[in-house]
Image: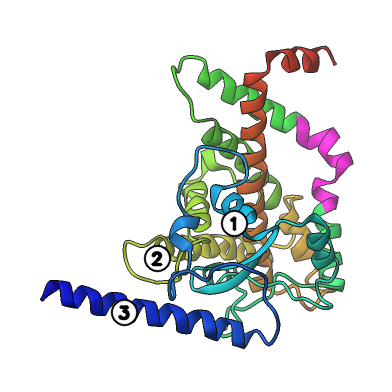
Amino acid sequence: MWFAMGLVALLILAISHWLFERRSHLASGGILPPGSMGLPFIGESIEFFLRSKSIDIPPFIKKRTKMYGSIFKTSLLGRPVVVSMDADFNRFILLQEGKMVELWYLDAVAKLLGQEASTEDCVKTNATGYIHKYIRSSVLTHFGPERLKDDLLPQLQAIADETLVSWMDKDCVDAKQGCTAMIFSLMSKQVFSYDAKKSDDKLAEDVQNLVGGFLSFPLNIPGTSFHRSLKSHKKIMEMIRREIDERLSSPDARKGDLLDHFISDMKNEAFLTSKFISYLIMVLLIAGFEAVSSAMTIAIKYLSENPDVVQKLMVN
């Protein structure tokens, strides 16, 4: 009996897979690149999430690039996608944003960053045109080359020195965690004057939980990564909105950070609502939290493996 039930299950799975592939192809209205859509709903997500110790191109991408070429189709987290490893094509797509193509987020990211059009919290922080130029100009004012050289690098140096001293009596350290803590300390102070040492809120932990839910199935079930992300998202937004409300009620108490910059421009820029600014601050925290700390960790790895390069850097 169990054998028969197994055959039936395999048959249903095979038919579902065929229908899924066929529907995906027909719905495209054009010719899709080669590739596989994997299993129904989950697609090839399981293999995509398999961990690798290498910091090279992930095995999932490398394997499919070898099989199908630099552009291939797949299905991840319940969504059909096209993956491109072609530099020229990627540049073309980036230049066409807001013209031939529109920025799109995975379902989990859309819900966590306020990009889901079906929700009342949708704020479209992926704005283009004038709003994009305003955000870029504001960020460069606080994190541009001149500010970086004269103010931010000395602050980062002080934080790095403090971190390295704390590592001296340890047999083993987590470099990624240390880099994340350093960058987050600097970014949070510059963005909205948050001081982790003086606050009871575990903002860094909440941001880490939030980022952990980006590449997950958007299932709000207790125990899942997405559920934890939603809880952290709520805590982060409440903290930022409290800070905004406090500053709006006391306009003369300025702190000179990026949040002050946005609040002072609210009277001149209609799109700068409290909700928009809250999401924007959160996105900036995430950007510093993940991207910069990862780059620093890789730099530490390569420098530790190449002491001759360290010597040259010290001479320079």
Q: Which residues are magenta?
A: 140-153
In-image side of 88 versus 23 (left or right): right
Residue 28 sits above or below residue 229 on the image: below
> In percent of the image, x 10 and y 76: which residue is there?
1
Q: Quadrant of the C terminus?
A: top right
> In percent of the image, x 44 and y 17: which residue is there?
171
Tag 3 residue? 11
Mark with earlier residue (2, 3): 3
Quarter assignment of residue 30: bottom right
Instruction: Name, please, the residue furthest toward the left.
Output: 1
Quarter assignment of residue 79: bottom right
User: Would residue 119 be seen by someone viewing this image from the given angle?
Assistant: no
For the residue marked with disc 3, what is the amino acid?
Leu
Disc 3 residue crowd, few under 14, some 14–19, many 20+, Cα 10 Å: few
> In percent of the image, x 76 and y 29: which residue is there?
154
Q: Secondary structure at mark 3?
A: helix
Residue 20 sits above or below residue 160 on the image: below
In the rendered image, residue 150 lying in the magenta stretch gets the answer yes
Q: Secondary structure at mark 1?
A: helix
Q: CA distance from mark 2 to mark 3?
A: 33 Å
Tag 1 residue? 64
